[in-house]
Amino acid sequence: MKKIFLSFLLLFSVVSASESGWGDTPNKLDPVYQLKVDAYPKFQTEMILKNGKKIRFCCVKSMMHFYFSPYRYPEYGVKKSTEIDRMYVKDYLDGKNTDAKKAWYVFGSRLIGPHGDDLIPLSSKARAELFMKRYGGTRLMPFEKLSAGLIRYLDM
């Protein structure tokens, strides 16, 4: 009976890990807001550093805090954003992983993220416009338009 239970438990943990889509990542808590990352699956983001470390975040706003000032988190060994290799967000409508630098972001929607107002990522401008019809929004921005000032404003 113990063997059956342990086999079931092992199988369940493997299936759960593969469904998350993020692979093997070390941090359970968001490094910026100290929130449980897995508690907000639709908002999760991931960053891969050039040193090979993977960092998960509870939302876009948190990842952008890290991106604009990585020196505030010395435990990851990153001093500049140039030491970040890749960043991924989940398209809010379908949950698929998207390159954060190619995504479009909705500002000012009715949707509230894990830590208040947030930027909602979508994989294309057309999908972002569709999102805005349903959830509202005051601005639609590509990654290049995101700034440290905007992220601080979202935290007010």
Image (cartoon, rainbow, N blue to C red):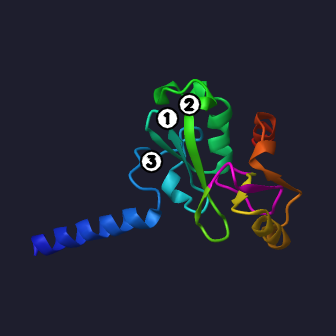
Give x and y (percent) for residue 10: 24, 66
Q: Nearer the viewer, residue 153 or 101?
A: 101
| The disc label shown at residue 70, or none | none
First in sequence, mark 1 or 2: give its number: 1
How crowded is the residue under tag 2: few (<14 C-alpha within 10 Å), some, or many (20+)?
some
Give x and y (percent) for residue 149: 81, 35
Q: Nearer the viewer, mark 1 or mark 3?
A: 1
Residue under label 3, please give it. Answer: 28
Residue under label 1, please give it. Answer: 50
Q: Contact, CB < 8 Å: mark 1 with mark 3?
A: no
- Badge 2 element: helix
Relative height, residue 148 to residue 111 (above, below): above
Tell me which secondary structure the magenta stretch mostly adopts: loop
Which three-letter amino acid code belongs to the residue tagged 3?
Lys
Relative height, residue 84 to residue 101 (above, below): above
Relative height, residue 72 to residue 140 (above, below): above
Give x and y (percent) for residue 111: 75, 62
Residue under label 2, please give it. Answer: 83
Q: Nearer the viewer, mark 3 or mark 2?
A: 2
Which three-letter amino acid code belongs to the residue tagged 1?
Lys
Q: CA distance from mark 1 to mark 3?
A: 21 Å
First in sequence, mark 1 or 3: give its number: 3
Q: Contact, CB < 8 Å: mark 1 with mark 2?
A: yes
